[in-house]
Image (cartoon, grey):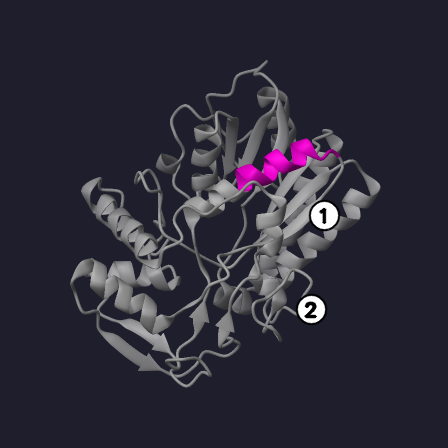
Amino acid sequence: MLPSATMPSAGTASKTTLVTGGAGYIGSHAVLALRDAGRAVAVVDTLATGFRWAVPADVPFYHGDVADSGLIDRIVSEQGVSAIMHFAGSLLVPESVTKPLDYYRNNVVASRNLIESAVRNGIPHFIFSSTAAVYGTPEIVPVSEDARKSPINPYGNSKLMTETMLADVAAAHPLAHGILRYFNVAGADPAARSGQSVRNATHLIHVAAEAARGLRGEVMVYGTDYDTPDGTGVRDYIHVADLAAAHVAALTWLEAHPGESFTANCGYSRGFSVLEVLDAVDHVTNLTLKRTIAPRRPGDPATLVAATDRIRATLDWTPQYDKLETIVAHALEWERQLDARGLRPSSAT
């Protein structure tokens, strides 16, 4: 029995972008950005961590797995797919350490099947959701795209493997790709149409926003003895709406440069420490979050900041929401919306 689909329509005009994982956090924002740009879009998602309500009702939705080649063939035929944005997969670093085979299945094997489907169907453009985890613990900061790739966990390894597959496939087939390596994604849609919705997510700004809503009693600060100005880890936080806009810009670039591929970091080239983030949350909410100091977590680098010269030079992309307090305010508003709309999940899934 084929997975269910909502609103598929045979004969749909070509140049539809298929967004895998489009019911998830980043994928749902990419769907919104594509629609805002006037582009046709379709979504495939297992809903393992995504939410059906996160996909607009007028967007064709397919409930299924990207590893299902028959399903992908059907979507391509029904929707006239000319590009794929691939967000589907597993993304929790600690979980990848305890469940490595799950991550290699969900992130590598499934991606391999999806890439094969793209080649078989003659899809010319493929944009891949990668990560700064491919760099491991960087030797030089800011981290450039040419820095040594040395992942320190199965999650980073799985993403790097897919990057390698795309490069090898592009050398053998007419599948051009854009690889976007995310640093720390945060915030929510400025119009409060979507946001981070999974309970017990580990991203700092999301954790702090949940604490501000009374869903957590404290925020853990892992390590205060790093070689940074205040001793806590420094990260490059990018607003999810700016990241989604970068994906649309990446697709536009691929369309304008037939047969060419590129890889770029996604960040702001500016970092904030854990304590600076928590201070920003306190300021925006006029609260004082409880902070509990804990030992460093293994593998956490002191500073992780992106070099972004390449993305700014390559794509027609200018960040619109790069102020820390703006990112925090949008994340907090989304937390309020989850409660107001009755959308907050009741479990950790």
Query: Can you tell which quarter of the image residue 53 is in?
Result: top left
Instruction: Name the secondary structure under disc 2.
Output: loop
Residue where numbered disc 2 is placed:
148
Q: Is residue 76 above or below residue 106?
A: above
Residue at left offset 63%, top offset 45%: 314
Which quarter of the figure has residue 328? bottom left
Does the magenta segment cover residue 15? no
292 on left or right of 158: left
How many residues crowd around disc 2 within 10 Å: few (fewer than 14), some, or many (20 or more)?
some
In the image, residue 253 lies in the stretch drawn in magenta: yes
Q: Nearer the viewer, residue 269 or 196?
A: 269
Q: Position of residue 221 (x, y in %)?
A: 34, 76
- Residue 114 percent across, percent down from the top left: 66, 40
* Residue at image location 61% in from the left, 20% down from the top: 14
Magenta-highlighted stretch: main secondary structure? helix
Part of the protein shown in magenta: 247-258
Q: Which mark is residue 166?
A: 1
Q: CA distance from mark 2 to mark 1?
A: 18 Å
x%, y% of residue 72? 62, 32
Quarter of the figure with the N terminus: top right
Q: Secondary structure at mark 1?
A: helix
